[in-house]
Amino acid sequence: MSGHSKFSNIKHKKEKNDAAKGKIFTVIGREIAVAVKEGGPDPANNNKLRDVIAKAKANNMPNDTIERGIKKAAGDADSVNYETCTYEGYGPSGTAIIVKCLTDNKNRTAANVRNAFTKGHGSIGTQGCVSFMFDEKGQIIIDKEECDMDADDLMMLALDAGAEDFNEEDDSFEIFTAPADFSKVREALEKEGIKMADANVSMIPQNYVTLTTEEELWDINKILDLLDEEDDVQEVFHNFVTEE
């Protein structure tokens, strides 16, 4: 099915304009700040920071920008404190949507997320209303064009490092891990020089909802586009797909 290939979404975002790239850098910058505050500025002693740096590099964030972000978070006691918050809700035809945010103003974020759902004729639900339809997994995406390793060798490398599953798509490889094993598997791939298009702990849908009508597709894309424009929004997970 089209619509649930994470790699196609990644490529689409990376091909977008500079404003979209700026949004990605803002998202990662906040993750760096939180990781440093929680575990310190030394990546050697901070798993979470190592994972965020890997994500930054996968998104072509310059090294000096990464280093500035770490130094700023480490040296500024008065810097903004970001809080994590999650919203769950419904799009057209009962599609499930999870929105993860880092914010310095929960009231502003709640209003903006609610507005995105409303404009796409969706609705915010209560905590836990859709998250049971997803499994939390480490997810690593590798672009086939960027990978010289044979598929079987890559699969064995990932499984030996502790991965749970390995999928081969038309244009990418997907590796899934338990959240606790994500860092270990990612680092094993990194040591072998495997370039990752994306590496993150994600919410993977257990089942997908196929949207077919023009109205449904307009609504879901309105919700997702508005959430994508919101700086406080870090990640959006959903279970919608389109027909082939």
Image (spheres, rainbow, N blue to C red):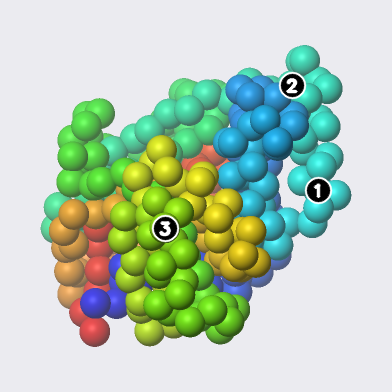
- Of mark 3 and mark 1, the one earlier in the sequence is 1
Give the distance between the C-alpha atoms of the residues marked 1 and 2, in whole angstroms: 17 Å
In the depicted structure, whether residue 218 falls above or below residue 117: below
Q: Residues within 10 Å of mark 3 (few under 14, many from 20)?
A: few
Disc 3 is placed on an element classified as helix
**Closer to the camera in the image, 63 or 18:** 63
Mark 3–mark 1 Cα distance, whole angstroms, equals 34 Å
Mark number displayed over residue 160: 3
Asked if residue 25 can be seen in this view, the reply is: yes
Of pointers 1 and 2, the one earlier in the residue sequence: 1
For residue 158, side relative to residue 197 (left or right):
left
Q: Position of residue 167 (x, y in %)?
A: 33, 70
CB under 8 Å between discs 3 and 1: no
**Residues packed near mark 2 inside 10 Å, few (<14), some (14 to 19) or many (20 plus):** few
Q: Residue at x 18, y 75 (%)?
A: 212
Q: Earlier in the sequence, mark 2 or mark 3?
A: 2
The residue to which callout 1 is attached is 65
Dot 1 amino acid type: Thr
Q: Which residue is mark 2?
A: 79
